[in-house]
Structures are given as C-alpha cells and as structure tokens.
Amino acid sequence: MKKVININFQGQVIAIEETAYEMLKQYIDRLTRFFAREEGGDEIVNDIECRIAELFGNRLKHGLNCITDEDVASIISSIGQPEDFDSDYEETASQPGAAASSESREQASASAPDDEVRRSLYRNSGDRILGGVCSGLAHYFKTDPVWLRMIFVLFFGLLFWVYIVLWIVLKPKELETNVSKRLYRNPNDRFLGGVCGGIAAYFKIDSWIPRLIFLLPLLFNLIGMISFFPLNFLFDDVDFSWNINMSVVVVYIVFWIIIPEARSVKQKLEMMGEEEYIRSIRERVSSNVASNRSRSDGREVPPATPANMAAAKEESIEKVSIDEMPPLPTDAYNASSNMASTNRPQVAPSSERSGCLNGFILLLKIIFFTFVGFLALVAVSAFVAFLFAGAQMMPLKSLFIDPGQETTLLYASLILLVGVPIISILIWIVRRVMKAKSRPTIGLVSTILWFGGLVTAGILAAQVADKFSEESTLERSVELMPVEGKSLYVDMKPYQDDYSEFRIGWGMDTDIDHLPYTNVNEDSLLFRDIYLHIRNSSDSLFHVRTVAASSCHELRGAKADLEEFSFDITQHDSLLLLPEFLMVPIEQGFRKQSITIEISVPAGKTVEVSDVLNNYRNQEPPSVVRRRIRNYTQTYMTMEPPHNEDEESEVGSEVVEQI
Amino acid sequence: MNIENTQSQMRKGVLEYCILSIIKRGEAYPGDIIDEMKSAGLQLLEGTLYPLLNRLKNAEILTYRWVESTSGPPRKYFHLTEKGEAFQALLATTWNELATGVELVTRKPSEESDMNNNTI
C-alpha cells in the first residue's frame, strides 16, 4: 500500500507514489549539485527535468494510474547517475581536441592525469564546513576529515593562515570519501545535535556514556549552586569553575560544527558500520511492528525476520534499501532513505519516554540554550562595544593621521577590513535565506578585498609609526630669583581656562592622564606628560631647567615642533608654580610630546613638592630625556618625596660626594 | 589496462560527431537524438547528452528554438549554426581519415602485407 501524491512537474500534473517522488527529488538534487559548477548548469538540469516529465507523460498515456518506484528507477538508470557521467563528460570537456584528433601523444596525455587525479590535493566541495580544505586534506591522507578539522581548530592561531592560503590555492572538486568508518552526528540518537550519539556509534558504546561525560561538569555545577545540598562539603575541594562548564559547552558546539550529520544511508553505514546499522534498523522495525501489534493484541513481540536481514546484508552497500523487506512500514523507509527527515524517526521514541524524562530533557535543553544564549550575548556585546569604542576614537584620528593621503588610507582600510566581511556575511545570509547557489567568485573577491584592506592598514600603520621614529629634545633653563629660605616650594598652577577632553567611551576617559586635551579654542593641545626630576645642584643655588621632547618623522620637524611648546614656569619668592598642562599647537598632532622639569637642589637646602604633583614625580621621563640628564639614576625615582628634610639633605650630600 | 575505460574513450570521441550529424540532417530534440542513437545500437547515457548539448550551444555550434509539444513540456529543437556546419564538416573529414586509417591498420596482417607489396 503506497500513498500517491500529485506534483506539478515542468508544468504538468503528475500522479506519483510518494516514495517514487522522494527518489526523484533526491535524484534531481544530486543533478543540481553536480551541474552547479558547470556554466548553464540550471539549464541542463531543466532540460533533464523536461525529458523526465515527457517520459512520465508517455507512461501515464499508456494507461498507468501513477508513476511508481520502478518507473522512476528505470528512467534514472537510462539517464544515468551523476557519478557515472562524471568521468565521461568531464574528460570530453577538458580534452575535446584529444578525443577527436588521432594523435597518440594527446591521447597519452589525456589518460595520464586520470591516475594522478586520485592522489592530488583538492578542496572537497562535496563535504565541507567552510572551504572543504580539511576534507580535501583528509581525502589526500585517507583519514576522517573530523580529525583534521580538530587540528585546525586546536591550532587555530597557527594554522589560520595555512587554511586561508590553501583555500585560495586549491581547486574545489567533489571527492568521494575513501575511509570506511567516519565520525558523524547521529540524527537518530540525539538530544541536541546528535554529537554524543555519533561518538557513541563511532566507538560502539552506549550513547549515555559520552552524554554523561559532557554533562558531568554541568551537573556538578548545579549541585554546587544548591548550597543546602547535604553532601555539598564533599565537593568543596573540587573546582567547579564556570570556565570548565563554558569550555564543555564550547567543545560541544565545536563538535556540532565540525562533525557532519549522517544524512544518507551510505553515511549512516560509515558512521556505525554495516552490521550495526542493519541491526539498528531491525530493532527499529521490530519495535515498530511490536507497537502496532500491541495496540491490537497486547504485548506480543514477534522476532524480526532474520532471513530477510541476511538477504539485505548480502546486498551492496548502496542497495541496502528496505525494498528487500516488504512488510516494513514507511517509517523505516524514511530512516534509511537519503531524505530521512531528522525529526520523524525521533517522534516514535520520544512518545515512548515517560513524562518525567521528557521534562528532564526539556530542562537540560533550557539550561543548554541559556548557556549558549549567554555566550552569544557576551560575544555580540563585546563586538558592539569594540565598534563603539572605535567610533569614539574617531575625534582622536586627526591627532595621529594627517588629512589627505593618510585619511584616504584610513577610510579605505576601514571599509575593506570591516565593511567587506559585513557585506559578505549579509550576502551569505541573504543567499542562504533565498536558497540561492553560492558563487565562489564572491568569496574570492571579498577575500582579496579584505587582504587589500590588510595591506592598506599595514601601509598606514607604517606611516603613523614613522612619525614617531625620530626623537628630539630641547633644553631650556629657567631664570630663577635667588631663594631666600631653606626650601623651595613647588606647586601646580591650575589651567585657568576651560578645556575639553577627548572622550573615548563610557567613563573610559577618567584614568587616561596622558591623552591630550584641547583648550576651549581648539587651537592647542593640552598634555599631562609632565615629569618632575630632582637632583643635586653643583653650586649653592637652585637651578631649574626644562627638557622638552617630541618625535617626528625627521629631526628637523621635531626641532621645529619643540620651539612651539608653551610651558611657563613662574616664581613667587620661594614658590615655584608649574602649569597644569603642556600646551602645543593643535597642528602638531600627537607626537609623544612631553616635558621634564629638572630642579637642582644645592646641598643643605630642600625642595618641597606639593601632593598634586606626585603623579609627575612618580613617573619616569621618556628614555630620550633620561639620556640627556647627567648622572640620571634610579635613586631619584625611588626616593621618598622630600617632606623629610633630614633624609633629603642626607641623600643630597651622598650624591654630592659621589660627584 | 581497463577495457571499459578504453571502450568509453572510443565511444566518447565519436559522440559529438554523431550528434552533430544527426542534427545536421534536420532539427532534432534530445529525445530524437537518443532514440536515433539507440536504434543505431550506439549506447548513450542520457545524462551525458544534455551537458554536451549545452556546451555545444555555449560554443555557438548549436542553437535551438522552443517548440510546443502535445505530450509534455515544450521541447528544444536544435539546429546547427554556420560555425556548427563548418565544425561538423571538419569532424567529418577527420572521421573519414580515421575510419579509413583504422580500417587499413586493423586489416588482417596477410592482406596488409599484400597490399603494401602491391603499392610498392
């Protein structure tokens, strides 16, 4: 008994058995995939569809009620499987001349690559997660692609570029798997993605074992959360860090991504081995029959027919179709057919589960998706914050980057580095939603553009770095009136006018002393890069001098910039006032400008620095300045602030003796 | 050496020539071509024909027009372009050379030697 459906095929209404329809649909899917890389592939598939429709029409005209499995099978065999005309037509495509001409030399060259094809490296377009590089490599080394994918994920930082290069260099080609056993996700035995089910099938163990391994940290954590759990003290020493939980989730997601799902019969056979697979079908069938029977006459479980099973096993791998076992219900057929929808086989077992178990599974799923959601939220918000911070940095742009060529470079690299990926992701999503075919050229072009962005960014970075390549300093001594008392008091003169800060983002500006500020006219930059340096005087007088430092791409530029610094130190008797900011014209931009004030203290006298200047004292002046200061030693930096007069004079005299 | 491989190589070479010759005689749609090839005893996988026609069409050797059909969807009737005529003619000369050459080479050794003697 078979269900017949009506389909609209190439403008004709055709009555067809449901199973035959599934077969046809798969066949056309395979054709579509096969001809996808051919120019005008759609048209070819359409032509073939027309032909099939015509053959259907003929058959129906001869008095048949509907198209059956046999009809479809015979049509498919007369048109041929894509694999069969693969070699046929591809060689004629590449060697039309060789086939037509009688030259033996060309004949030889036509047959020679045939053997090499099997051993050369391709990207496998038939089995891929990203570009099919791993899969192609696995084909080359005759291993399961999953292992290579794991290596690439584990050594992501190292192998990222290798992957990109291989992606670009290697040619795509549909490759048949050449390993008999592979790790797949098992759609028939799954809670979430079927990862654990697949692992269990691969290692021939019960699926609760990998599941438990994955869930243990989560369970421990749950126990740890419930503080009143009576045996909680037992787990005190165990580290249920959130990190372990997270990493388990991440590992699961990575597995979910890199392990393909077993969809076709062939893949399922590769997943669990032939015998296992047939056994699992047998179990499913018998349980299905049992449940059917039990509805009518109680719990009577008939044994599965071993003779049929044996017969099926004799068939070749491809042919393990349930047609050999006529009494099978459609459910089993679906499970074995390529189109096995992943949900349908799931329905039967879940209805048998008790309500409690279902609740538990639901709970686990909720917990899992909360984890994943949390992770995703963190990732997205980090990305958004990054973007915003970048946007907030834009006012600072003019300080580093000159208008003109450099600005063009900046925007070009921004568009290429950020815009291109976003646009290609959007295109990908749209194509995914529209179910359009992916075009490899788009990927290639956007990759090339992105690399172009890297190059421009590199050039820009080099240019910006070049501005800091030459450092120069300018020394000025400040005229001091003779100081009457024993001490010189140093204080800060606050900036009298208003000024505005460059804001980077939410509250991030509070701690950054070294970022420049602008004054209210926005014609000057105000820096806090001020360093205070105290040393012994060589005579009996106080001396003050300033060492200004700046960098530029050439020394002359740096020298010219230094002349424009404004830093007016004023003296009122024994009080020395330092301005709050170092002021430079805004045209200079940010060039690591700084100023160091060096106060020379004669023996027997002290200097008292106000607390507001502590910041200046505690930081070390830039290296270019340190080289300029004679006898610069770490001692000055680590020295206590000179509140204690004795200590100050002591240290002072000590150094004097050294000199 | 795989016999099937050699056989398919042999067939492949003449496939285009056969198809073009059939079309040269008059407009034809893929169904006709398949029927004719089959009745002549030339095995042809239909799946191979469509991509081949498509490529010939892309190479401007063939063009087609749509013809409504009483049984089924509209059909593509193919005919040769000028370029296609020339292409087919070239293939024909090549084939004739090949056929006579093969004939000569594969004849029985005794006859062959006789013939060689005669010509010399």
Image (cartoon, coloured by chain):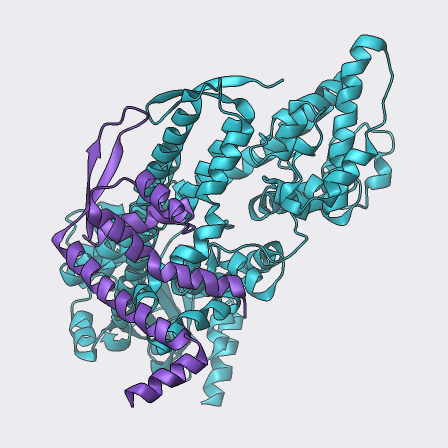
Residue occupying the point 55% across, 65% down: A140
Asked if residue A507 can be seen in this view, the reply is no
Name chain B's colour.
Answer: purple
Q: Which corner quadrant holds the C terminus of chain A? A: bottom left
Asked which quadrant contains residue A490, the reply is: bottom left
Residue occupying the point 50% across, 27% down: A21
Q: Position of residue A183 (x, y in %)?
A: 66, 49
Determine the residue located farthest toward the top in the rendered image.
A296
Asked if residue A431 can be seen in this view, the reply is yes
Left or right position of A461 against A324:
left
* Residue situated in front as seen by the camera: A401 or A645: A401
Q: Position of residue A274 (x, y in %)?
A: 73, 46
* Residue situated in front as seen by the camera: A138 or A443: A138
Q: Position of residue B96 (x, y in %)?
A: 27, 67
Q: Please tell me how many numbered marks the rendered image carries.
A: 0
Asked which quadrant contains residue A7, the reply is: top left
Left or right position of B51 against A521:
right
For residue A236, above or below residue A559: above
Residue occupying the point 52% across, 50% down: A127
Left or right position of A273 against A112:
right
Residue occupying the point 54% across, 54% down: A176
For residue A145, above or below residue A192: below
* Residue situated in front as seen by the camera: A176 or A553: A176
Name chain A's colour.
Answer: cyan
* Residue situated in front as seen by the camera: A37 or B49: B49
Q: Which corner quadrant holds the N terminus of chain A? A: top right
Q: Position of residue B75 (x, y in %)?
A: 27, 33
